[in-house]
Image (cartoon, rainbow, N blue to C red):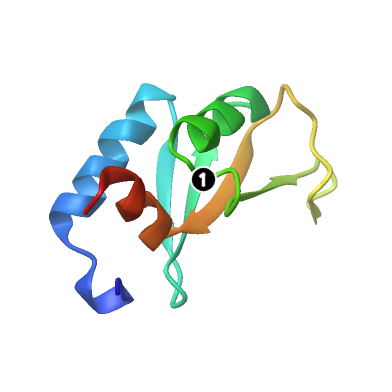
């Protein structure tokens, strides 16, 4: 089982490489091993989640102009998706 303490540098590098393909950047992960990644728009985020087998696990959020974070998103603006690191590792079959 992946924990914050045993996420390997190799797994993080693989995640960064895949995110680069979608012009996304890694924000990090929390104590529950949920990754936050920022995408240029909802289309890129959805495509990444679909191709990585994360649709079932990922959720999307966006900061609006007034500074509030909402789950309702504008499709053309920057979004952040969160997903469990273990689900990404399973996608890679690690």
Q: Nearer the viewer, residue 29 or 49?
A: 49
Q: Residues within 10 Å of mark 1 (few under 14, many from 20)?
A: many
Q: Quadrant of residue 62?
A: top right
Residue that mark 1 sits on:
54
Where does residue 78 sit, x and y in percent of width and height? 64, 32
Total numbered labels placed on residues in the image = 1
* 51 displayed left or right of 76: left
x 25%, y 49%: residue: 93
Q: Nearer the viewer, residue 2 or 20?
A: 2
**Residue 29 image offset from top left, x and y in percent:** 42, 63
Q: Quadrant of the N terminus?
A: bottom left
Q: Nearer the viewer, residue 93 or 9?
A: 93
Position of residue 87 in the picture relative to residue 63 (left or right): left
Rendered location of residue 56, percent (x, y)? 60, 50
9 vs 57, nearest the viewer: 57
Residue 28 vertical placement versus 4 (above, below): above
Q: Say which quarter of the image contains residue 41.
A: top right
Residue at left offset 57%, top offset 33%: 45
Is 47 placed above or below 55 here? above
Q: Secondary structure at mark 1?
A: loop
Residue 69: image quadrant is bottom right
Residue sitting at x 46%, y 30%: 51
Screen quadrant of the C terminus: bottom left
Q: Residue at x 70, y 28 (%)?
A: 77
**Position of 13 compared to 32: left or right?**
left
* Residue 24 screen position, x and y as percent: 44, 33
């Amino acid at each position: 089982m992946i924990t914050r303490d045993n996420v390997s540098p190799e797994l993080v590098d693989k995640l960064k490489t895949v995110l680069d393909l979608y012009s996304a950047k890694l924000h990090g992960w929390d104590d529950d091993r949920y990754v936050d990644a920022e995408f240029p728009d909802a289309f890129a985020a959805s495509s990444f989640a679909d191709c990585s087998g994360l649709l079932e696990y990922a959720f999307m959020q966006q900061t609006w102009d007034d500074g509030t974070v909402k789950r309702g998103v504008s499709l053309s603006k920057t979004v952040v998706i969160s997903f469990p690191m273990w689900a990404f590792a399973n996608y890679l079959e690690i």
